[in-house]
Image (spheres, rainbow, N blue to C red):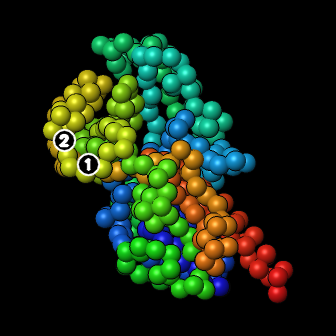
């Protein structure tokens, strides 16, 4: 069986790796215009934390995706590959000056080893000059895409996978005998003529602040997320913005908000500013494309539209594997 995975971000790489595990005899290729540090995933903060805006289609359980992702990363974290794959435990706080519902997260509360409400003393001690009313403390993971993607690609190649660097403008460009897995993210807007895919612009700073060991979330998309080598300060959320240039007003706002949240960040060394476009869709699309099959005889399974949760919701790749196996059974039954 020949399979072509389109896209080499976190969704594409995790899908290719899971397909290899499920179908060791299959010939699997990753085709993408960009790899590793050139992908959107490479700039992501990488914290495992789903938001309320993550939704699937009819009959799809987002909780299953999140649990699958968590178990997948946990297995790597428990292995000797944890460091090189860029996965580490991290704990921290989420604060809100609004409703308590902001700091609740049913998807995580039933999954993580620790997720509890912060006490008033904790809020006062950490943020004495804030007007935060509610908080949550929890332990999760950070997945550094700058490490995870090269590690994943290497594992994929070592297991017999192949790579092709090429921009795909239509599914017809792929060998017609291949099963295509579409993990093109924002590129799916044009490739699939899917106007439900919309960019959400995000801007962050990468800084050097080794004294920051915990993550912190505040109001207005303010967050501080440490990894093994740097700290991500964010952020912005500009719906339907295609602007990939750093904005000086956003930069000033991010630094001011993060420094107010954790004052000693004023001493952090700025490494770089980064802008990325999150591939948002009102419903993450994970399904076999019946229309392409009936009209053009092209077999495509879609896996895109994760928005800012590509890392957290990479468990959609497990659903892709199930769809592939189901398609194989259907094809055999027709012979």
Question: For this rendering, which residue is in front, 332 or 25?
Answer: 332
Residue 180: which quarter of the image? bottom right
Q: In this orientation, does residue 104 appear?
A: yes
Question: Is 49 rendered above or below residue 146?
Answer: above
- The image shows residue 227 at horizontal and vertical percentages of 36, 48
The residue at 45%/13% (across/down) is 133
- The image shows residue 157 at horizontal and vertical percentages of 47, 80
Question: Is 21 rendered above or below residue 262?
Answer: below
Residue 92: which quarter of the image? top left
Q: Which mark is residue 243?
A: 1
Dot 2: element? loop
Quadrant that contains the N terminus: bottom right
Task: Please state if 141 lies on the left or on the right of 329 as rendered.
Answer: left
Dot 1: element? loop
Task: Please state if 63 lies on the left or on the right of 331 as rendered.
Answer: left
The residue at 31%/64% (across/down) is 37
Question: For this rendering, which residue is in front, 153 or 82?
Answer: 153
Task: Please state if 187 lies on the left or on the right of 291 as rendered.
Answer: left
Q: In this orientation, does residue 208 appear?
A: no
Q: CA distance from mark 2 to mark 1?
A: 9 Å
- The image shows residue 74 at horizontal and vertical percentages of 57, 53
Question: Is 165 rendered above or below residue 261?
Answer: below
The residue at 65%/49% (across/down) is 57
The residue at 53%/78% (across/down) is 4
Q: Which mark is residue 11?
A: none
Question: For this rendering, which residue is in front, 113 or 182?
Answer: 182
Circle 2 is placed at which residue position? 247
Task: Please state if 122 lies on the left or on the right of 222 as rendered.
Answer: right
- The image shows residue 199 at horizontal and vertical percentages of 38, 49
Asked if the residue at tag 1 contacts the one at tag 2, i.e. Cβ–Cβ closer than 8 Å, the answer is yes
Q: Nearer the viewer, mark 2 or mark 1?
A: 1
Q: Around disc 1, counting alpha carbons within 10 Å, would you say few (fewer than 14), some (14 to 19), or many (20 or more)?
A: some
């Amino acid at each position: 069986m020949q399979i072509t995975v389109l896209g080499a971000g976190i969704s594409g790489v995790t899908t290719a790796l899971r397909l290899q595990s499920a179908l060791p005899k299959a010939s699997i290729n990753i085709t993408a215009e960009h790899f590793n540090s050139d992908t959107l995933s490479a700039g992501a903060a990488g914290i495992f934390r789903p938001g309320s805006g993550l939704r699937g289609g009819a009959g799809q359980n987002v909780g299953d995706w999140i649990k699958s992702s968590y178990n997948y990363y946990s297995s790597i974290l428990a292995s000797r590959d944890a460091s090189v794959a860029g996965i580490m435990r991290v704990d921290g706080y989420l604060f809100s000056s609004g409703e308590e519902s902001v700091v609740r997260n049913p998807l995580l509360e039933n999954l993580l080893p620790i997720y509890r409400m912060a006490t008033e003393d904790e809020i006062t001690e950490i943020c004495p000059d804030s007007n935060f009313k509610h908080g949550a403390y929890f332990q999760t993971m950070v997945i550094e895409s700058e490490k995870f993607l090269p590690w994943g690609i290497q594992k994929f190649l070592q297991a017999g996978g192949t790579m092709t660097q090429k921009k795909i403008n239509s599914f017809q460009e792929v060998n017609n005998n291949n099963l295509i897995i579409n993990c093109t993210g924002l590129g799916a807007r044009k490739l699939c003529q899917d106007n439900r895919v919309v960019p959400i612009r995000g801007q962050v700073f990468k800084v050097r602040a080794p004294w920051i060991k915990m993550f912190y979330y505040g109001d207005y998309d303010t967050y501080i997320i440490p990894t093994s080598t740097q700290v991500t300060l964010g952020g912005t959320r500009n719906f339907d913005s295609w602007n990939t240039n750093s904005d000086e007003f956003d930069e000033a706002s991010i630094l001011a908000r993060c420094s107010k949240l954790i004052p000693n960040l004023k001493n952090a060394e700025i490494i770089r500013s980064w802008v990325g476009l999150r591939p948002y869709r009102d419903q993450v699309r994970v399904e076999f494309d019946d229309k392409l099959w009936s009209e053009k005889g092209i077999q495509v399974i879609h896996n895109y539209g994760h928005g800012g949760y590509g890392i957290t919701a990479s468990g959609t790749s497990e659903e892709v594997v199930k769809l592939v196996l189901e398609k194989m059974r259907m094809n055999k039954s027709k012979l």
